[in-house]
Image (cartoon, rainbow, N blue to C red):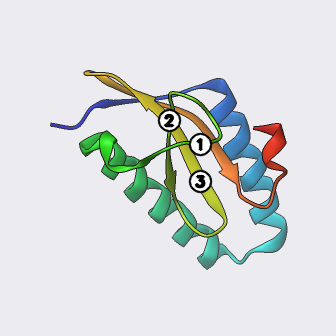
Amino acid sequence: MALNVIWTEEAKNSLSDIILYLEENWTEREIRKFFVRLEECVELIALNPQRAKDSLRKPNTKEFQHSVNTTIFYQYDEVNVVILKVWANAQNPDSL
């Protein structure tokens, strides 16, 4: 059974920043593919949250690579998956 998915404000904001970049630099087709893949990743995480690797950058957190460009950071318990951040991998990791 899939867990509930909760997006933090930080996750929503980081995704908004990525969307702004995509709208300026990618085609509509590429953006659609990005979101289809994002939805697939979130569904996979909700179905099996332990599948992703433990993050070495954020303690008590899992990280799931959405693409070569982005990583999803999350935590989970028996009921919920909490999306903490959608990270653009080109960013400085010190700002995580």
Image quarter hosting the C terminus: top right
* Amino acid type shown at disc 3: Thr
Alpha-carbon span between mark 2 and mark 3: 10 Å
Assign a secondary structure to mark 2. strand
Name the residue tied to disc 1: 56
Q: Give coordinates of residue 66: x percent, y percent.
A: 52, 60
Q: Give coordinates of residue 30: x percent, y percent.
A: 62, 76
Marking on residue 74 = 2
Q: Give coordinates of residue 12: x percent, y percent.
A: 64, 35
Tell me which residue sits at (84%, 50%) in the image: 92
Image position of 68 with respect to 15: above or below: below
Alpha-carbon span between mark 1 and mark 2: 13 Å
* Amino acid type shown at disc 2: Tyr
Which of the two residues, 35 or 85, is positioned nearer the viewer here? 85
Alpha-carbon span between mark 3 and mark 1: 13 Å
Marking on residue 71 = 3
